[in-house]
Amino acid sequence: MGRGLATVVPLTITLSDANDNAPVFLHESYSATIDEGAFKFDTPLRVQAVDADATSVVQYSIIAGNSLNIFAIDGRSGEISVTQRNGLDVSALRTDTIILTVQANDGGNGVVTTTVKITVKVIKEIFV
Ligand SMILES: [Ca+2]
């Protein structure tokens, strides 16, 4: 007796599509050296960010510092490559140190992005 009324409260828990974590790069910054004229980095230069959300798929892009589009990044792997078909030529730049800003984009609802800087020092050929 006495328990004639009950209240049912609908409870909805959504786990699958929450996007509440930004991608986090494994390193605070990256640096590499490359010889002028090289076609690629001797040690592959690859940035990587992890995202705690199951639904997030991280995509990489270079968003700053890529004067003359000398470098490219693989959107999925984060590997940086040289785009110049005749080898790296920075003679048109006023510097031998190139600082790229790479963005990781998690592609989720309310897309969350993180950026990291990559410092590339170009070792100039020495003519003797
Ligand atoms: Ca995320």
Image (tube, helix red, strand yellow):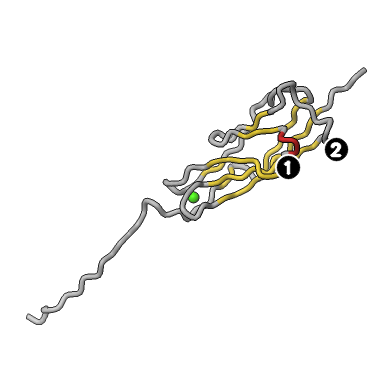
Where residue 46 sits, quadrant-wise, is top right
- Residue 117 point in image, percent of width and height: 69, 44
Q: Residue at x 58, y 33 (%)?
A: 74
Residue 84 location (% of width, % of height): 72, 26
In the rendered structure, which amino acid carries the disc numbered 1? Gly
- Give the quarter of the figure containing the N terminus: bottom left
Residue 33 falls left or right of residue 21? right
Whether residues under marks 1 and 2 lie with C-beta atoms below 8 angstroms apart, the answer is no
- In percent of width and height, residue 89 lies at 79, 27
Label disc, if present, on residue 44 of the rendered structure: none
Which residue is painted at 84% across and 27% down in the image?
Answer: 124
- Badge number at residue 65: 1
Residue 53 lies left or right of residue 122; in this view the side is: left
* Residue under label 2: 94
Residue at image coords 45%, 49%: 53
37 shown above or below 72: above
Question: Residue 17's x, y, as percent?
Answer: 39, 52
Task: Inspect the image, locate mark 2, and give the three-letter code of the amino acid beneath it.
Answer: Arg
